[in-house]
Image: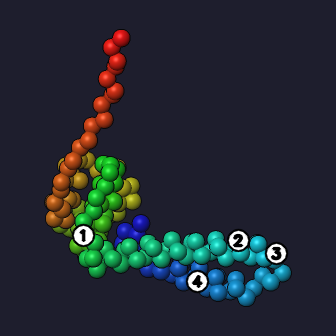
Amino acid sequence: MITNERQYLITKTELARFQSALAAAATQNKKLHPLLRKAARDGLQSQADELSEEIAAYEKLRAGKETRFEFDSIAQLAEGLIKARIARNLTQKELAESLNLKEQQIQRYEATMYKSAPLKRIEAVAVALGVRRTVRMDVSLPMARAKG
């Protein structure tokens, strides 16, 4: 997941490199067995596709085209907060300033998917981002024992 402009630019550069490698692969390696050439092209194409998807997802968030995020676990909450920041067109620095934190603290939280953030801080981030929450909990209970 791309979380900031720096990563976005790096990812776009990497995609261009993969696309160049794909173009070169089409004309080079004629001495390789066709199956090996195909495997090499497929590997490059797979990587290029993944990078393209990440770029498209980031651009969609940044353009405000995605503003609702659903998740199935508390662990996915962090990804939702990062997506909300991007959708609000806030940089990590701007979010940090709104919370009276240093930019590096937000960078650390996002890099570790908020694992080191106390619950109060996660709540403060959600409020700063204007996140509205709906919580639904499903509790799995053990199967009732059959009486014999």
Q: Residue at x 55, y 76 (%)?
A: 48
Instruction: Work out how far the residue at label 2 is from the one at label 1, CA to CA, in angstroms.
Output: 38 Å
Query: Compared with residue 145, is residue 141 higher up or lower down, i.e. above or below?
Result: below
Q: Residue at x 21, y 59 (%)?
A: 125
Query: Compared with residue 92, is residue 29 higher up or lower down, i.e. above or below?
Result: below
The amino acid marked with disc number 3 is: His
**Residue on which disc 3 sits:** 33
Element at badge 1? loop
- The residue sitting at the right extreme is 31
Instruction: Work out how far the residue at label 2 is from the one at label 3, CA to CA, in angstroms.
Output: 10 Å
**Residue on which disc 4 sits:** 19
Pointer 2 or 3: first along the chain: 3
The amino acid marked with disc number 2 is: Ala
Quadrant of residue 114 within the rendered picture: bottom left
Pointer 4 or 1: first along the chain: 4
Quadrant of residue 110 within the rendered picture: bottom left
- Closer to the eye: label 4 or 1: 1
**Residue on which disc 2 sits:** 39
120 sits left or right of 24 in the view: left
How many residues crowd mark 1 within 10 Å: few (<14), some (14–19), many (20+)? some
